[in-house]
Amino acid sequence: MKIGDRDFRSIWAEEDGERVGIIDQTKLPHELKIVHLTNMEETATAISDMWVRGAPLIGATAAYGMAFALRKDPSDAGLAEAYDILHATRPTAINLRWALDAVRQRIGALPESERAEAAWALAEEICDEDVETNRRIGQNGLKLIEAIARDKKPGEPVNVLTHCNAGWLATVDWGTATSPIYLAHEKGIPVHVYVDETRPRNQGAGLTAWELANHGVDHTLVVDNAGGHLMQHGKVDLCIVGSDRTTALGDVCNKIGTYLKALAARDNGVPFYAALPASTIDWTVRNGVAEIPIEERAGEEVSHIIGINDSGTVERVRISPEATPVSNYAFDVTPARLVSGLITERGVCNASEAGLSELFPEYAKKRA
Ligand code: MRU
């Protein structure tokens, strides 16, 4: 998508074939810092320290991490070691395992002399596929926005609430939750986005708001606790969130606080959708609450906050008493019964085993 008048992806291979460019997302929205990754260790750090984040982008970055590792050591042992290191970087987003499995299966079958080059090509393929997948998610989700614009809000903006950043920065391009929004905007459908700030790391305030502003999409930043109030007052027509892992029964694991938005949406009759690619579906998990590992991150993400002061200096300040204990669960699970539907690259389906099996019969068959 656009930064100024320049088209960007969130990750790209440089022409030298040696380096992978990323945007250090920990610096946004105050600084656009491009970083070049040159080896597997840096790639692992980029994921665990969240220079890159968002389920699909984590997967795409990890694929390049495998390619870097295979340049150094293309043996089976090298492959296995890189897999384990990269897999340990973030536990919840399943796209990480999906991408690592794809590299292990396809590249592990090749002779050692061919592995590094083939892994690099596969990482590029994963990135290109992600862009196309998200564009399709956008086309499918666009129909929901179009229907509201036509039937409920003719001539008025459609108000979409989103949580965290499931935008182009969380994928290679387009985003998942934002893709229908960008397409509606491009089609001239008036759309306005309520952006949850998304404490503790503020991916809404720092990333989603930044993306939408750069692309010229009308939006308003709200505190995380505002969603229920906005919905009670008819200010939200549709919620669209992303997903870090969706179960075979349609439970949606996403950034902490998503569940509360779904509860408020249900109480107020607001449709609540999750937008996700097939690579986010974990067909091995049925009950999301019981089975999905929820990442717990450093307490300092909660007790401290980063911002820019009036002199233009980026500062980190503590907002709680020094001795106060902190817990920091990064994700929660929204049960399928609260999800109006899943927007995927193949279409929109019910958040249920039957809905998912209809869209993805080949996976359903494999599990049976
Ligand atoms: O911790 P993060 O920033 O990686 O969490 C990101 C989210 O929760 C997104 O909503 C999710 O990855 C969907 S990505 C399109």
Image (cartoon, rainbow, N blue to C red):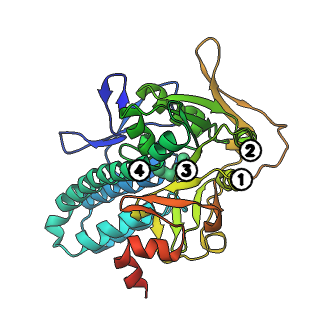
Going by the numbered disc 4, the residue's amino acid type is: Leu
Going by the numbered disc 1, the residue's amino acid type is: Leu
As measured in the structure, the alpha-carbon distance from the residue carrying label 4 to the one carrying label 3 is: 16 Å
The crowd level at tag 2 (other Cα within 10 Å; few <14, some 14-19, many 20+) is some
Q: Residue at x 51, y 31 (%)?
A: 27
Tell me the number on the disc at residue 241. Answer: 3
Q: Which residue is mark 4?
A: 57
As measured in the structure, the alpha-carbon distance from the residue carrying label 4 to the one carrying label 1 is: 25 Å
Q: Residue at x 66, y 37 (%)?
A: 235
Q: Earlier in the sequence, mark 1 or mark 2?
A: 2
Would residue 32 be visible to someone looking at this image?
no
Asked if the residues shown at circle 1 and circle 2 are in contact, with their CB atoms under 8 angstroms apart, the answer is yes
The crowd level at tag 4 (other Cα within 10 Å; few <14, some 14-19, many 20+) is many
Q: Does the residue tagged 4 have its C-beta within 8 Å of any atom of ligand 1? A: yes
Q: Earlier in the sequence, mark 4 or mark 2?
A: 4
Going by the numbered disc 2, the residue's amino acid type is: Gly
